[in-house]
Amino acid sequence: MALARQSTFDLLPRTRPGYGSPRSAPYKTERKFLDFVVDRVSLYDTIAGEQDLASALWIDPPVPNEIVKSIRRLLLLDPGDLPSGRVSLYTCAECGDLGCGGLTVNILRRDEDIVWCDFGYENNYQKGPYLEPFRSLGPFHFARRSYEARLIPLLSQYS
């Protein structure tokens, strides 16, 4: 059996620019978040930005309990946040609500790897996910130790 190619995993601060004011439409709230970077390529730039989504790891305004929940799901310590059991990576940049839809993934533990596969778009009220536009993305195999080393320190930072 051939070994899967290892991908690199990182998190980098990003900003979804805002404009206007809530009192005068149109407006968008500036949103700062940690972007998922795979093999030195931003997933925000690749798939989330054009859909006006931000990662589930908002850092400004900080929502520590939600960040911790997202990290625990990414680490497979808690179940996914969708009825399908999948994990949201990017959600509505305005409110973070999965009812607005988001980019989701299956996360699996395979021996010493963490695997992200079956990227899709879904919400928390329809049967999903919609996978077709994302068939060419992934699967990504991350070395479990380096993946966890990047995420685990955030648990104590936001707890």
Image: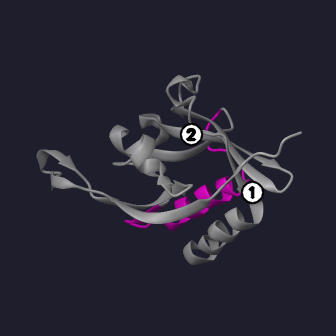
**Along the line of sight, which residue is nearer the eye, 25 or 90?**
90
Q: Is-magenta flag for residue 68?
A: yes
Q: Mark 1 points at which residue?
A: 77
Left or right: residue 56 versus residue 73 is left
Give the image location of residue 24, x and y in percent.
Answer: 10, 47
Question: Mark 2: which secondary structure?
Answer: strand
In the image, is 28 to the left or to the right of 154? left
| Residue at image point 63% right, 66% down | 151
| Amino acid type shown at disc 2 | Thr
Residue 41: x and y in percent read 48, 53
Q: Nearer the viewer, residue 32 or 62?
A: 32
Residue appearing at x 18%, y 51% in the figure: 22
Mark closer to the observer (2, 1): 2
Image height of 60 relative to 127, above or below = below
Check the image and name the residue furthest to the front.
2
Q: Please state the horizontal and vertical placement of residue 157, each as a whole percent of the image.
A: 57, 77
Residue picked out by circle 2:
104
Report if residue 89 is visible in the image: yes
Q: Is residue 52 in view?
A: no
Q: Give the range drawn in magenta.
A: 58-83
Q: Is mark 1 on a helix, strand or loop?
A: loop
Please tell me which residue lies in front, 5 or 105: 5
| Residue farthest toward the right in the current orientation of the protein | 1
Query: What amino acid does circle 1 point to?
Result: Leu
Quarter of the rendering occupied by the C terminus: bottom right
User: Across the whole image, how many numbered discs are drawn on residues?
Assistant: 2
Tell me if mark 2 has few (under 14), some (14-19) or many (20+) residues whose alpha carbon lies within 10 angstroms of its own: many
